[in-house]
Structures are given as structure tokens and as C-alpha cells.
Image (cartoon, grey):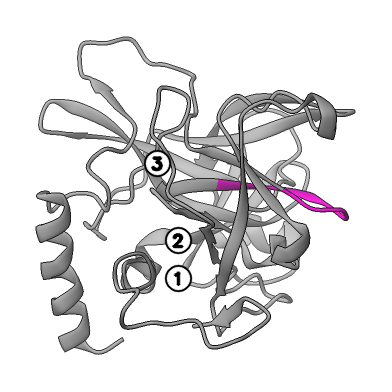
Amino acid sequence: MTAGLWCFLFTLLLAHRGSAHFLDSRCSSRNVNKSPSWDTPWMAVIASPTRNCSGMLIYNQHVITSASCVSDPRYSTVWLGNVGNLREHQRRGVKYSIQTVYTHKLYNKQYFEYDIAILVLEGPVTYQRSILPICISLDTKKKLENLKANRWGLFEQSIFPRTNTVRILNVRQCRQSFGITIKKSQICAGFRNSRKCTEPGSPLVQEMTVSKKIWNTLIGIQSGGSLQTCIYNKISNYIDWIVGIVLSVDIILPTNSSNFVNL
């Protein structure tokens, strides 16, 4: 994306949101003096006949996930809110069809690079207590601390939201787990317990304090995983790509009849 286009999109963003901090100022937050909540109203289930994945609502019609989770949108659905169950006749929450899928054109499955995709839903989402977007910060220089990993705990056909505290791992530790050297656009992190880190599309989250509020901010999207080690793609490396898709629908238009667009 050119510098001129980025400036245009950034100006458009300020006009739409009135805030230079986050992509959507209505994203999940709490007052500083309020106790932490384990609610994760941004979490989505991307359901298809072959697999189920995690995703995160980032705007009122957009869900972000890993490119490795994307299947044919004609046979996939997105569930938001209090899902609770994977059985079709017992599912709760709100169901959405997928209008368009944007996958990053540089996606490399072997090395987990550029493993990112945005799903455009069939219509806008109505925000409520159980359905709110996760924050995406426009400040790309953030210290990685106080991180947590949200995921869906799957037990047979039931869903139980889970949160794990994580720690950043060094290059050597990550290479021992995956046999590859991670890039600067990636984050290698480990759970502080023995939980499996194998849920593609799930978020790495940081609480940021801005304007006397604590905001749940998306830091990374999980791509690869082993027993206790995860590889996340760093969201700060994709800000222009995300903003370009979310806000510039008159600039980036789908051209593929199969509903897949590589950008």
C-alpha cells in the first residue's frame, strides 16, 4: 500500500471513529477501577463441514482469523455471542454467512508467515454485551507485556471459552519446537501451563490503558502450535492491510467470483 493511500485511509479513519487510538472506538474495554473480566465478546467460531476455527470480530462486519482456517465461504458460517455448543440444532449465539474472504497474498503455510485473513460478513453486526469487537491499536510500537491467550476449549461438541497467561519465548526456544527461525513479523509465545497451543485463528491479547480505560487489544493471531509453544503473526505488521480492507471498500473491490480475494 502506498504512503498516499495510507494517509488517505488514516484520515478517513479519524473521520469515522473520532479516535486515533483504535480501529473501532466501540471495542471491548472497562474502567480502570473495575475488576478484570474473563468475558471475551470478540471471540467468533468459524464453522465448516471439515473443521472449526477461532476468529475475532474487529469491526461491525469483519472477522479476522488465520489464512489456514479459511475454507469455502459457501459452506462456512460465523457464530458470535454465547455460542455454547457445536451441534447445529443446539447452537446459540448469532449466525452469519460469509460474503467475502480476503487472504494475504504472501501467505506461506510452511513457515506460518502472513497467515492472516479477513472475513466480510453478510451484514453488519449489532453490538451488545456478548458481541463486541476486539481493539486494534494504530500505535505499532507497543511493549509486549501482560499478555493472555483466548481460545475455545472444545469438549466433544461443547464450547468453553478459555484464557491462558503466556510468556514470550526466544528464538532458540521456538526453533526447538518448530525447527524454523521465526521472522520479525512473528511472535513466539508459550503457555504458563501444560495446555496445548493448537488453535489456529485464536488471539494473543494485551490490555492497554488509554484515556482512563483498559482496552482489550489484539496483538497476534495464532498460526502454528505445539504442546506449550505458539507462533503468532504480529498484528502491528498488518495495520495498513487491515485498515485498507475494513474502511476502503470503494478502493479494494472483490474481483473473484469464488468470493476469495488475495491482497
- Work out which residue is located at the far front of the displayed protein and give it: 123
> What is the number of callouts on the image?
3
Q: What residue range appears in magenta?
A: 47-55
Location of mark 3 (residue): 134
Q: CA distance from mark 2 to mark 3?
A: 15 Å
Location of mark 1 (residue): 184
Q: Are marks 2 and 3 in contact (CB under 8 Å)?
A: no
The location of residue 224, given as percent across then percent down, is 69, 58
From the viewer's perspective, tell me whether residue 236 is left or right of residue 148. left
The location of residue 217, given as percent across then percent down, is 35, 42
Label whose residue precedes the other's in the sequence (1 or 3): 3
How dense is the environment of label 2, judged by Cα within 10 Å: few (below 14), some, or many (20 and up)?
Answer: many
Q: CA distance from mark 2 to mark 1?
A: 8 Å
Say if 120 sits above or below 135 in the image: below
Residue 168 visible to the viewer: no
* Circle 3: residue type: Ile
* Circle 1: residue type: Lys
Residue at horizontal 51 percent and vertical 56 percent from the top: 64
From the viewer's perspective, tell me whether residue 184 is left or right of residue 47. left
- Marking on residue 234: 2
Secondary element at image label 2 = strand
Say if 46 sits above or below 157 in the image: below
